[in-house]
Image (spheres, rainbow, N blue to C red):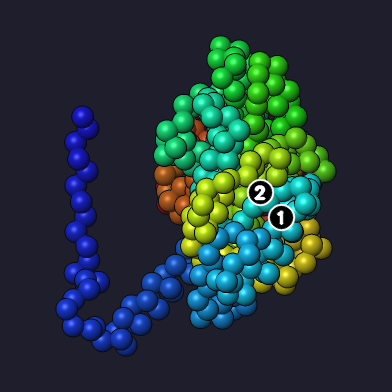
Amino acid sequence: MSPRTALTPPDEGLAIGFQPSPPAADTRALHQMQRALAPGERPFLGLPDHLEQVMAELAPLLGLFTDQQGGPYDDTRFDDGARAYEKAVLAYFAALAGVCLDEAHGYVAASPREALLHGLVLARRGLPEPSVYISEQAHYDVVRVCELLGMNTVRVLASDDGTMDPDDLRLQVRMRRGAGALVVATCGTPLHGAIDSVTELRATAAAFGPVHIHVDASAGGMAAAHTDLVAPWSLAHGAHSITLSGNPLLGLPVPAGISLVRRVQDPPTNLPITVPDRLAVGARSGLGALLLWTRLRSLGRAGVAAMVARCQEVAAYALATFEAAGVAPERFPGSLTVTFERPARWVVDKWRLHYSGDRARIVTTGPMTYTAVDELAADLSAARQGVAA
């Protein structure tokens, strides 16, 4: 048994005491934290981080209380007015995934992980005791959700480009034929930004029994929907359910996940309860849907497409610039992720880069401008020459 990690004591200055604390002092402390976390004060290129672009337009929504009871299409006396906005958001994301809402249902979840949980729970209704086939490059949330659901997971090898290896999937499913296969494909793997081919994985697994394909497109779905040169990845290509998110591209101040499931994969329930059990939760906040709606309305479909195009241009520029810096960069076609040799610790810490093993990555959204690429490339070159921070 591993030793228990020592707990870090809480900051005494932040302790919640018996008496109220001076509000002015607390406000100053929060403003100080806000300044410290501002993008101008902290280079942060390993993950999307561009909230300064949207906070002004979204701030009024924080003054609303929205308590959603049940799903967006349920007839309920609890409707607080946010359902209409959620339906508009779902229609937008359904179109991105290649279907209309007559073909799929879903809801806006509090996080991509909750949306993933919802998708896998519904998948298990059709395949009561499936093995879940997960790429070794899949997001750790997939593994965590399967653990929470007590589902048997099978790790599938990845190809050199980061996609799930169909040959290894064939081997693994054949060894467990007949039990049903729940294959979790990924659109935008955490390190490489790779996109699994839904059509190939479905055909591979279906040769040995019933199959359900769920796509975790939280990281790469919005970019893939606006890119021609990508693998078949969506509901339109044969997936049964999908998880999406607007956070990586749109830059929301809170997480929000979108779960969409083909209606034919969602058997009706006869449970005598007021709030349908089709959702992962009963009562939920409508804030995520309102934030998504506000941001998407301000951009329009043309604005989102233009944003993706700009991000891809920066990714292509980063690939060429890092190649000149000699750090062996790689980029999956159409992806906003560029990976490269993991640099010295001081570069990782300065730019807060995400890394795994001997590779690091950037995602070309938000603060990743041409200037930022040049500055990071200069540090990568300096680190290769042995220059310290």
Residue for point 22% across, 32% down:
2
Q: CA distance from mark 1 to mark 2?
A: 8 Å
Type of residue at label 2?
Leu
Residue for point 58% across, 29% down:
127
Q: Residues within 10 Å of mark 1 (few under 14, many from 20)?
A: many
Residue under circle 1? 93
- Mark 1 and mark 2 lie on one chain; the one further toward the N terminus is 1
Viewer-proximal residue among 47 and 132: 132
Q: Is residue 279 above or below residue 77?
A: above
- Asked whether the residues under the numbered discs 1 and 2 touch, taking CB atoms below 8 Å apart as contact, a structural biologist would say yes
Residue 142 pos. (x, y %): 51, 38
Residue 41 as seen in the image, left or right of residue 159: left
Please say whether residue 63 is visible from this viewpoint: yes
Residue under circle 2? 260
Residue 170 pos. (x, y %): 64, 16
Q: Secondary structure at mark 2?
A: strand
